[in-house]
Amino acid sequence: MLDLYRGSMRLSILENFQYRVANYFYMIGMIAEPVIYLVVWSTVARAQGGSVGGYTPGEFAAYYIVWTLVRNMNIVLTPYAWEFRIQRGRLSGELMRPVHPAHFDLAFFVGWKFVVIIMWLPIAALLILFFQPTLDPTPGGAIGFFIALWGGFLVRFFLLWALGLITFWTTRVSALFELYFTVELLFSGRLVPLSLMPGWAQQLAGWLPFKWAFGFPIETALGRLTSQEIVTGLGMQAVWTLAGLAIVSVVWRAAIRRFSAVGN
Amino acid sequence: MSLIRLAWAFFRIGAMNDLQYRVNFFVQVFQSGLALATGLVGLSLVFDHTSTLGGWTRYELLAVMGVHILMGGLIRTAIQPNMERLMADVQEGTLDYALTKPADSQTLVSVREVRIWQSVDIVMGSIILIFAVAQIQTGVGIGQALAFASALLLGALMIYCFWLMLTTGAFWVIRMENIIELFQGVYQAGRWPVGVYPDWLRTGLTFLVPVAFAVTVPAEAVTSRLTPNTLLGAALLAALLMALTRFVWRRGLRRYSGASA
Amino acid sequence: MPEREPGLKAAIRSLVRRKTREIKAVDRISFDVAPGEVVGFLGPNGAGKTTTLKMLSGLLYPTSGQVRVLGHIPSRRERGFLQQITLVMGNRNQLSWDLPALDSFELNRAVYRIPPVDFRRTRDELIDLLDLTDLVRKPVRNLSLGERMKTEFAGALLHRPRVLFLDEPTIGLDVTMQRRLRAFVAEYNRRTGATVLLTSHYMADVVALCKRVIVIHHGHMLYDGDLSGLSDQFAAYKTIGVTLEDASASLDAYGEVVGREDGKVMLRVPKTESSRVAARLLNDLTVNDLTIEDPPIEDVIERVFAQEAPKEDAS
């Protein structure tokens, strides 16, 4: 199993290195989003006398620059991939293998993340140059951030892997996926730092899994959380990862049954 | 002109065929609705904490959002589908078919495709725009309307030029798929008036990716901010870009056909 | 074209340097084609046939030399030129995937500016000739590979071109459909007098359609002329099949034994010797059956393709 991971990861690293241009295009296109949020909120903060919602422009810059790393890390297998896989007809072959297909996906993405981190560094340097963030991490925060980064990846990986399996039952899935992504956008800390949302929204966000893959890792890096909060947060990540794993194993079995019954 | 007749033929047939798939209409409405909701949430969050942004009031910003959605719909209806097909053609070698047809190749690859259901956004953006403008002022003068229409057209032309020049890059660097994502990311910046951004970014959004001319300038037309100079500048820039695009396209073709450069 | 060795270290190195190699796709090929001829370009993959065709249709600029088709220089891509030619590439579709073929035909009509009456007549003729009546209303993606190819042909001929460039048109199709399309092309050439230039690596395409064959290999023209002359040049032998009373007799003295089948021995002998060897066999042995055959054209082609590329410096 370890060999499988090592081999798949290595392949993934090679492949993604080869497609570095495509990767860079994607990453650059993706930073537009946080830069826009950053600029807008910095403008608001300056208009409101220096800070808004507990964030100064410099802190917004820090938030959204860390955002870019967290975002790159929590990009996982898109639920739309399943439509592709089922239609392509290769699924039958892959099901014959004695290993759960999620392992291959996981290994592939983990390998990819290493390339992503390396490619992110120059982008981050440029962003820091241009937007001058104020960042004050604590050592506990830094360690916590590193763990939370991967934790966020795992949470999102399993949840979206499970979500994609709905494709086995219906191909009209785009409405559901887009709804999921919209809710995630609003309640994860992706659109704005959660402290800027109305109170009821922040409470709701605590119950949903989204913030643990996004806002929580970012806030850990910014040094805004107490050690206790960090530990609790990591715990929540673990909880949601396990929940994701559970959902995946249950739904996967049902999906295979469905697939074998209906054929491709 | 015969090129317009050609474009119309492609539009008519493409649209008629798309219209058969009525389910896609509802899917599009739903997705546009979600995007609109997100935009409105973003806007209201900002205005929970402030009353103007860079000198623009709440309804003025709503007007900007309306233009942004409208223009986005226009791009996804008429421009993006053609560019995607061009990219695919270059990769799969089917561009040869377009090049052996007795029609101007640039025109042909620019008008072949249409996604009629994306025009839901054109309608929705227009509604938002009209609503927002109604909150700001009581009527729209004919001059203002003309200025708006021209600004919109010029902005669309510039976006087309930008897209085509970028896609022509496929003749040199075959894999260009992520252009789409790159553009979509940068285009999001048009949700807000470009004056909000720092200077260097504003310049980029004006001259590098003409988002400013696509969204902010038309919005300025309906919020009494547009100066004749800006509109003239837009016209000149559009003409320049069209010429440049033509040049780049022909260069790209020469490269594609192995002509010594 | 860029090259890279496999492996992670090489992948990183290639970040810094790209190696390229210049390849002469087509070298010193020269020919004339008369109107109404059906010419087959034969050669293995990568031989340069498609490159030649692309130069003739204006898609590629030759780095040296001249190309003239219908009095035009193809690479100028003049409207008058493009109006009279058509290109069909096997396994590459130009009809819109999601539209019924009829709609794509309409689009071609607009592009080629075909007058409505002519268009309808030609279209209906082609639909009839290719048995497309039921197929043209379905979206192209719902058609089988062979049906799609037929509709591609129809779409490509609506403007009654004078020159047809067909690049591997039967590739990937089943045998019945291949035959069907060959018959169609032959019929079309007969009816309209259109010139057909066809590339293929299927022998059967060429045998069925082309009186004249140009063999291209490694970018060089190895042969230009009748199909029958091909064997004279490259495979100047005949195969004698002899069935003997005494099946175990050794025939090595008479020629090269290339096969034994059910008591029948196949002997390969030089063309000039064949009648003499046959006479000796009949004289020396008790022969139950004797046949003399030309080498199968496939074998000839195999021999042609097996030739080494002429030595040249790698640049």
Image (spheres, rainbow, N blue to C red):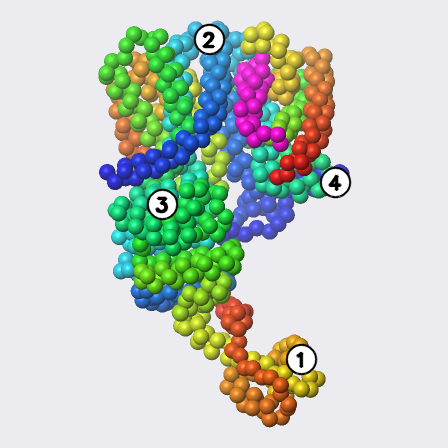
User: A45 left or right of A244?
Assistant: left
3D distance between C-alphas at marks 3 and 1? 58 Å
Residue farthest to the bottom, as pictured: C283
Of discs 1 and 4, which sits in the foreground?
Answer: 1
Of discs 4 and 2, which sits in the foreground?
Answer: 4
Q: Which mark is residue B47?
A: 2
Look at the image and tell me in which quarter the N terminus of chain B lies.
Answer: top left
Return the x and y of residue A156 as percentages of the image width and height. 64, 25
- Above or below, B50 relative to B214: above
Return the x and y of residue A92 as percentages of the image width and height. 66, 41
User: A101 left or right of B116?
Assistant: right
User: In the rendered structure, the residue with mark 2 lies on which chain?
Assistant: B
Residue identifier under label 3: C105
Identify which residue is drawn at 38% across, 57% down. C165
Return the x and y of residue C310 as percentages of the image width and height. 49, 69
Magenta residues, start to end: A168-194
The front one of C42 and A250 is A250
* Quarter-of-image position of residue B209: top left
User: C274 left or right of C229?
Assistant: right
- Which amino acid type is marked by label 4? Pro
User: In the rendered structure, the residue with mark 1 lies on which chain?
Assistant: C
3D distance between C-alphas at marks 3 and 4? 50 Å
Residue identifier under label 4: A98
3D distance between C-alphas at marks 1 and 2? 98 Å
- Which amino acid type is marked by label 1? Gly
- Which amino acid type is marked by label 2? Phe
Q: Secondary structure at mark 4?
A: loop
Identify which residue is drawn at 67% across, 24% down. A155
Residue identifier under label 1: C263
Q: Are marks 3 and 4 in contact (CB under 8 Å)?
A: no
Q: Are marks 3 and 1 in contact (CB under 8 Å)?
A: no
